[in-house]
Image (spheres, helix red, strand yellow):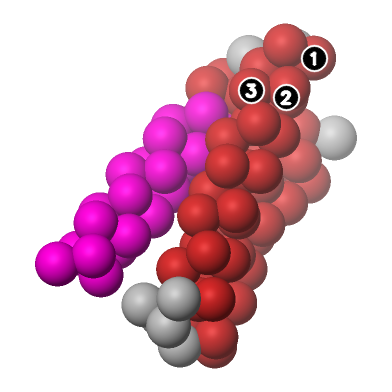
Amino acid sequence: MRNKIYKSAVRTLMKKYFQAVEQYASDPTPEAMETVDKAMRVAYSKIDKAVKRKVFHRNNGARKKARLAKALKKVETTAS
């Protein structure tokens, strides 16, 4: 049951992060970037905790974190 809680929380935080990135892409302001950074920190933390508790394999956690970083990188390169 605890695994379900962690998996659900990670999915939710990833969705919130992707929404923040989309908002930053449409209006790249420092405040929007701050929101993206905060969402990334929270998502990374929850993913790392899930990996530590063996809810996710460490490669799965790394893949999820890479997806988050890749989404931001894509937006930053198109913005500049």
Q: Residue at x 58, y 42 (%)?
A: 42
The vertical placement of 35 against 46, above or below, is above
The vertical placement of 3 against 73, above or below, is below
> Looking at the rendered structure, which numbered label has been put on residue 65?
none
Tell me: 4 left or right of 32.
left
- Report which quarter residue 80 is drawn in: top right
Q: Observer-nearest residue: 52 or 24?
A: 52
> Residues in magenta?
1-21
Q: Amino acid at mark 1?
A: Pro
In the picture of the structure, the residue carrying the numbered disc 2 is 33
In the picture of the structure, the residue carrying the numbered disc 3 is 35
Q: Residues within 10 Å of mark 1 (few under 14, many from 20)?
A: few
The vertical placement of 60 against 19, above or below, is below
Q: Amino acid at mark 2?
A: Met
User: Between marks 2 and 3, how big is the CA–CA gap?
Assistant: 5 Å
Label pair 1/2, CB-CB below 8 angstroms? yes
> How many circles with numbers are drawn on the protein?
3
- At which x and y percent is residue 79? 76, 33
Quadrant location of the N terminus?
bottom left
Q: Residue at x 72, y 51 (%)?
A: 73
Instruction: Mark yes or no: residue 64 visible.
Output: no
In the picture of the structure, the residue carrying the numbered disc 1 is 30
Tell me: 1 left or right of 44.
left
Label pair 2/3, CB-CB below 8 angstroms? yes
Q: Earlier in the sequence, mark 1 or mark 3?
A: 1
- Report which quarter residue 36 is drawn in: top right
User: Between marks 1 and 2, how big is the CA–CA gap?
Assistant: 5 Å
The vertical placement of 38 against 18, above or below, is above
